[in-house]
Image (cartoon, helix red, strand yellow):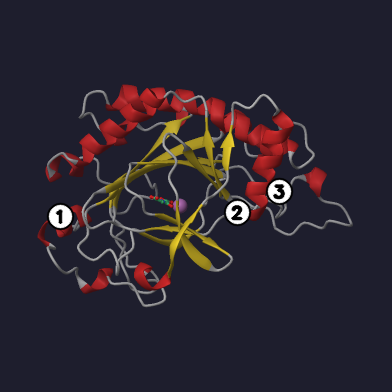
Amino acid sequence: MGVERVQEIANFSKETIPEEFIRTTYEQPALTTVQGTVLEVPVIDLSDPDEEKVVRAIVDASSNWGMFQVVNHGIPHETVRKLKEVGKAFFELPPHEKEAYAKSPGSQSIEGYGTKLQREVEGKKAWVDHLFHKIWPPSEINYQFWPKNPPSYRKNNEEYAKHMHGVVDKLFRCLSLGLGLEGNEMKEAMGGDNMVYLLKINYYPKCPRPDLALGVPAHTDMSAITILVPNDVQGLQACKDDHWYDVEYIPNALIVHIGDQIVSNGKYKSVLHRAKVNKEKTRISWPVFVEPPSDLEVGPHPKLVNEANPPKFKSK
Ligand code: OGA
Ligand code: NI
């Protein structure tokens, strides 16, 4: 196919990295990270029986940070461990086995194994390969993008998808109540049970110059919400009050990003974030982008707009 995978580039990059991976000084993590401070993004216990308290915490985090972590979320730790085990095993297969799942060059779909082909706006590349495939709803799944090897890949991913509904429903219920809507109204506005769960595995190989490169440059997610599990290698950074901070990992927590600001008419903020790479260890992360179905037009919720609160966004 002729595409250079970052995993291969990393194999021969012992001390330096190719020039196209060196970020501008405005982006280099060594120059732009607030040192000595780890950002303690709000940690929310989803099993707390005091729902009003949970709603308040989620509203506060979503309005001020656009990011929070949830614990006691109901997804068994073993389910998450097994999801990570098979994702890692896929990336450790020989190149030709991974290439069998490669995204075809002209394809409109995002699904498949890949490396960003074009350079980004600033002419720089990100130190990452990835695999994208939908995990929900069943009618949207394209199993040709799900690795057959390791053999338990499918079972473990299906198990994770099944357990995600509880968390997704709880989060949307709290986000909805926090807007003064009925518990189901926000999810319904996003497509209800037709919402699509798109899994991405980010594979960030060891990098000899983590001070100069980035795994993922600054962005906000295109999803409604994103639910991410990382391996144990730190690297996620969030921008708060115009400064970049490392995000502290809490064992067994899920990291939630707000992607959509439209339905809440700007009350909830999407978080600007990026990912660093590591010199000694491979980073891997598993975000699930929870999105409205592609044919659904989403706009500010009609119950939130009136003369005093005009819509801040167009429907799209
Ligand atoms: C992403 C992302 C962060 C991470 O893939 O959208 O923000 O820690 N990843 O891998
Ligand atoms: Ni992201």
Residue at the location (23% across, 52% down)? Answer: 205
The yes-or-no answer for disc 2 within 8 Å of ligand 2 is: no
- How far is mark 1 from mark 3, CA to CA? 43 Å
Q: Which residue is mark 3?
A: 264
Q: Nearer the viewer, residue 123 or 18?
A: 18
Residue 309, percent across and down?
A: 84, 56
In the image, residue 71 sits, relative to residue 276, either above or below, namely: above
Tell me if residue 307 can be seen: yes
Q: Secondary structure at mark 3?
A: loop
Q: Secondary structure at mark 1?
A: helix
Image quadrant assignment for residue 55:
top right
Residue 133, percent across and down?
A: 37, 38
**Local crowd at mark 1 within 10 Å, few (<14), some, or many (≥20)?**
few
In this rendering, would 272 be left or right of 144? right
Q: Earlier in the sequence, mark 1 or mark 2?
A: 1
**Local crowd at mark 3 within 10 Å, few (<14), some, or many (≥20)?**
many
Residue at the extreme right of the image, as rendered: 307
For badge 2, the amino acid type reads Trp
Residue at the extreme front of the image, as rendered: 36
Q: Which residue is mark 2?
A: 65
Mark 1 or 2: the one toward you: 2
**Local crowd at mark 2 within 10 Å, few (<14), some, or many (≥20)?**
many
Q: Which residue is mark 1?
A: 8
For badge 1, the amino acid type reads Glu
Image quadrant assignment for residue 23:
bottom left
Q: Nearer the viewer, residue 80 or 224?
A: 80
